[in-house]
Image: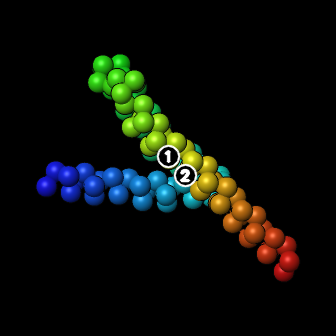
Amino acid sequence: MKVAILLVIALAIFVFHYWASRRPPRYWYVGGIIPLGWLVLLAMAFFRGRVNWAEDWKTIVFPTLTFFLMWAEGHEAAKKKELAGMKAKDME
């Protein structure tokens, strides 16, 4: 039961991050909520001694890169969408 709840929570976080990363460029910071929260949780775990970098580096690096790459890709997609909208308005 705990695993199912954790998977639902992880899916909800993933979906929110995907949505937040694709906000218009003037709201670029919304997509950074999840990566910032992840970094804060990592820092807390590291300073409390719950993270052993030598053993846990794959578990730390993979989600961190995923969050930041999703944010960057979503931001670029939102900029392209806004630019296409501006071009369409100029053509009218």
Residue at screen point 81% across, 70% down: 87
Residue at screen point 35% across, 57% down: 11
- Judging by the rendered image, the residue that carries numbered circle 2 is 70
Circles 1 and 2 in contact, beta carbons < 8 Å: yes
Q: Give the residue furthest to the left.
A: 1
Tell me if 78 is positioned left or right of 88 in this view: left
Q: Is residue 92 above or below residue 71?
A: below
Q: Amino acid at mark 2?
A: Met
- Judging by the rendered image, the residue that carries numbered circle 1 is 67
Residue at screen point 61% across, 54% down: 73
Residue at screen point 80% across, 74% down: 89
Count of numbered badges drawn on the protein? 2
Where residue 8 sits in the image (x, y, percent)?
A: 28, 58
Where residue 39 sits in the image (x, y, percent)?
A: 45, 33
Q: Quadrant of residue 60?
A: top left
Q: Is residue 33 visible?
A: no
Q: Amino acid at mark 1?
A: Phe
Query: Circle 1: is it few (<14), some (14-19), or many (20+) Cα within 10 Å?
Result: many
Q: Is residue 50 visible?
A: yes
Q: Give the residue furthest to the right.
A: 91
Q: Quadrant of residue 53?
A: top left
Q: Is residue 10 above or below residue 90?
A: above
Query: Closer to the camera, 9 or 30?
Result: 9
Query: Closer to the camera, 11 or 60?
Result: 60
